[in-house]
Image (cartoon, rainbow, N blue to C red):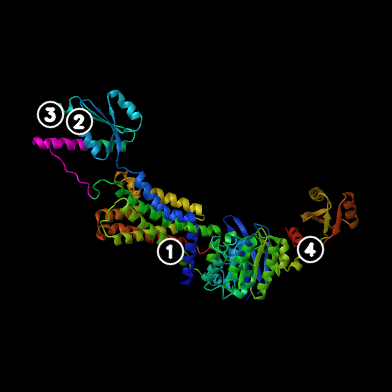
């Protein structure tokens, strides 16, 4: 039995459709990523799967149980970390963890092995109020709290939003450790570069899933030539490329512009165009973001 | 059970760590009772008066002495002519001027009557009324003592007794009202805010996705406030007793049990409010408007219900504090037992059941 099976799920809030005909499955001990910008419907989908919302249409089963009928079972056995770390800011680190342990009828000691690696990093601050922690430390504490009852399935809603780059990197390596414990992880993120950390990803946009695949699989489906352009003035160059007739797409990517020319232009024509506009460029390989933009 | 206590402990920590909450919870009852007790008082004490005495004889002297000896008045000024009266009032200090006519004592003996005029500053009508009544009563008293010596004139003198509050002390009226106000504010407002806070902070989502049952969450939220509201009730009763000398004629145990019932009613009202509000501000506004104003205005706390127009009187029947104020007045001042307040008690019990039923019906195990 797959830990998560969603079948044709739709959710409407009054007249707006937040989710439309979503179907996917997640395998055991897999890190499954929902990748998409704000407003794509990631949080709504999470809330339907963890029994907080009832879908307008479709059914979902989590840990083999129906999300509507058997919500109590699911609530006992999943861990959930909402988008805004739900910590009690006036309680200390240890008190937060203790509280979540108590309401799940367990104790910190009982499942210490599972959270040890994560909690050790913040244990030195265990008497500090959660409200005074940095974003990265809050994130670690929230993850510890979500793990304290040894859930079989973990829902992490944008766990890396508002967290510094180093902490984000650490966080993903922690998730990979958890996978070794046999925990299935469903994680959402608006950061495309994090997609590569997942075993499989679903690219979401306006309530639809555009594609589900391994990150490498998604990238391999990109069937255009892609160039990285390094201009002196990036905004001027972007304007120029966007208005040019040979451009298919052009978007800023860090210090460069990822540029995809139309298929019917030859290498010579491209070279000529670049030279006449005084632009440095080289052939580049696409990433998830390029694929995402291409699918939109 | 361990889960439930873990939750209650967490709630106590929330309360004790927030010094503002603490000030509100424990300072408000004391502040309110002092404010109502000392500032908003209808009792007259040391009102400043002036006298314009055209006869200056022994009788007028005795009357003025009697007035000042009563403790209600202080003789501030002796005026010389009618012209001085208006400026005296305009200066603002003097609340009342008493004018004795010419040959006051002589006329009283020879003609059996004499002229006395009382002029009061009615820019505050209630005070003016009280001053004039007090003054008339003292003068009447004096005339009677004169008549008694002569043993003549068959006059009918009604002997008035103000039962249950002999000296018409304002504290007797506001202590029951304050108990009702504080308990409903602490219980209903604070619980509705703390539940709304979990929703606002997003922690409610995690509590919902946990083995905690709705009853655990609700009872866990409510438990600390039962204790705190009960402490408040005792504080107000004792301050009333020791500071304002409000008697406790009836049974203290009954009073405390009734208070506890009223606290339960207020808490269930608070939970009901919280099921209807998603943010602390909404919860606060609903509590303020739905609880504070009606409790002050429509419960007989300050304004007597009997004087309200019929439709407004009808509305007071759905104000729980109304019944509680009745109960407290009965127990405190009249010393009556449950036999006399069972109807009111039943009404509060009814409200409790109603609010709990509505809360259970409205408590959402999911998000909207």
Q: Give yes or no for contact between labels 1 and 3 (Cβ–Cβ under 8 Å).
A: no
| Residue positioned 72% across, 61% down in the render | A192
Q: Which residue is mark 2?
A: B60
Asked if one can make out residue A31 in the rendered structure from this viewpoint, the answer is no
How far apart marks 1 and 3 lie (CA) works out to 74 Å
Crowdedness of circle 4 by 10 Å Cα count: few (<14), some, many (20+)?
Answer: some
Residue B89 in the image: x percent, y percent? 33, 29
Q: Give yes or no for contact between labels 2 and 1 (Cβ–Cβ under 8 Å).
A: no
- Of the residues tagged 4 and 2, which is closer to the observer? 2
Q: At numbered mark 2, what does the secondary structure look like: helix, strand or loop?
A: helix
Residue B136 in the image: x percent, y percent? 22, 35
How far apart marks 2 and 3 lie (CA) works out to 13 Å
How far apart marks 4 and 3 lie (CA) works out to 122 Å
Q: Which residue is mark 3?
A: B109
Whichever of callouts 2 and 3 sits on the residue coming sooner in the sequence is 2
How far apart marks 2 and 1 lie (CA) works out to 66 Å
Q: Which residue is mark 1?
A: B223
The dot on residue A222 is: 4
Asked if one can make out residue B239 in the rendered structure from this viewpoint, the answer is yes
Is B76 on the left-hand or right-hand side of B149?
Answer: right
Whichever of callouts 1 and 3 sits on the residue coming sooner in the sequence is 3
Q: At numbered mark 1, what does the secondary structure look like: helix, strand or loop?
A: helix
Classify residue B108 by image quadrant.
top left
- Of the residues tagged 4 and 3, which is closer to the observer? 3
Whichever of callouts 2 and 1 sits on the residue coming sooner in the sequence is 2
Crowdedness of circle 1 by 10 Å Cα count: few (<14), some, many (20+)?
Answer: some
The magenta segment is: B138-163
């Amino acid at each position: 039995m797959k830990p998560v099976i969603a079948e044709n799920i739709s959710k409407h809030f009054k007249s707006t459709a937040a989710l439309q005909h979503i179907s996917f499955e997640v395998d055991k001990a897999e890190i499954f990523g929902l990748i998409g910008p704000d407003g794509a419907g990631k949080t709504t989908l999470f809330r339907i799967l963890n029994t907080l919302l009832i879908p307008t249409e479709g059914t979902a089963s989590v840990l083999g149980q129906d999300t509507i009928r058997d919500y109590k079972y699911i609530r006992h056995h999943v861990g959930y970390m909402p988008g805004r770390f739900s910590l009690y800011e006036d309680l200390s680190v240890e008190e937060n963890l203790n509280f979540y342990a108590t309401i799940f009828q367990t104790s910190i000691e009982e499942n210490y092995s599972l959270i040890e690696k994560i909690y050790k990093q913040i244990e030195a601050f265990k008497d500090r109020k959660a409200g005074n922690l940095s974003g990265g430390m809050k994130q670690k504490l929230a993850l510890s709290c979500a793990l304290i009852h040894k859930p079989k399935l973990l829902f992490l809603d944008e766990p890396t939003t508002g967290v510094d780059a180093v902490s984000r990197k650490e966080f993903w390596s922690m998730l990979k450790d958890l996978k070794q414990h046999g925990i299935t992880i469903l994680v959402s993120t608006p950061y495309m570069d994090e997609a590569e950390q997942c075993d499989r990803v679903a690219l979401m946009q306006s309530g639809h899933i555009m594609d589900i695949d391994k990150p490498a699989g998604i990238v391999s489906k990109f069937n255009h030539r892609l160039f990285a352009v390094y201009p002196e003035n990036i905004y001027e160059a972007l304007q120029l490329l966007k208005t040019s007739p040979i451009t298919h797409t052009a978007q800023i990517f860090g210090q460069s512009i990822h540029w995809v020319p139309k298929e019917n232009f030859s290498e010579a024509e491209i070279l000529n165009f670049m030279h006449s506009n005084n632009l440095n460029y080289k052939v580049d390989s696409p990433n998830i973001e390029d694929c995402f933009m291409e699918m939109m | 059970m361990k889960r439930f206590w873990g939750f209650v402990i967490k709630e106590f920590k929330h309360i004790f760590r927030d010094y503002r909450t603490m000030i509100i919870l424990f300072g408000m009852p004391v502040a309110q009772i002092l404010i109502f007790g000392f500032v908003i008082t209808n009792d007259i004490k040391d009102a400043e008066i002036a006298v314009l005495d055209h006869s200056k004889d022994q009788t007028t002297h005795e009357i003025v002495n009697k007035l000042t000896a009563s403790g209600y008045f202080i003789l501030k000024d002796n005026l010389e002519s009618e012209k001085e009266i208006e400026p005296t009032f305009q200066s603002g200090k003097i609340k009342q001027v008493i004018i004795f006519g010419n040959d006051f004592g002589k006329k009283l003996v020879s003609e059996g009557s004499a002229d006395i005029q009382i002029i009061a500053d009615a820019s505050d009508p209630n005070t003016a009324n009280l001053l004039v009544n007090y003054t008339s009563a003292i003068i009447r008293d004096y005339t009677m003592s004169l008549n008694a010596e002569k043993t003549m004139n068959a006059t009918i003198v009604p002997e008035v007794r103000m039962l249950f509050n002999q000296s018409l002390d304002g504290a007797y009226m506001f202590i029951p009202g304050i108990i009702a106000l504080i308990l409903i504010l602490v219980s209903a407002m604070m619980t509705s805010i703390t539940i709304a806070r979990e929703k606002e902070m997003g922690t409610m989502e995690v509590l919902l996705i946990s083995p905690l049952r709705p009853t655990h969450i609700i009872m866990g939220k409510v438990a600390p406030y039962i204790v705190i509201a009960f402490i408040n009730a005792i504080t107000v009763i004792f301050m009333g007793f020791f500071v304002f000398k409000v008697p406790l004629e009836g049974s203290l145990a009954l009073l405390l049990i009734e208070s506890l019932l009223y606290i339960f009613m207020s808490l269930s009202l608070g939970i009901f409010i919280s099921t209807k509000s998603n943010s602390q501000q909404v919860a606060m506004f609903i509590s303020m408007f739905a609880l504070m104003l009606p409790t002050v205005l429509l419960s007989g706390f300050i304004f007597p219900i009997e004087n309200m127009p019929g439709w407004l009187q009808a509305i007071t029947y759905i104000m729980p504090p109304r019944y509680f104020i009745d109960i407290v007045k009965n127990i405190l001042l009249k010393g009556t037992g449950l036999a006399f307040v069972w109807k009111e008690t039943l009404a509060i019990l009814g409200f409790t059941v109603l609010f709990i039923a509505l809360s259970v019906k409205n408590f959402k195990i999911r998000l909207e």
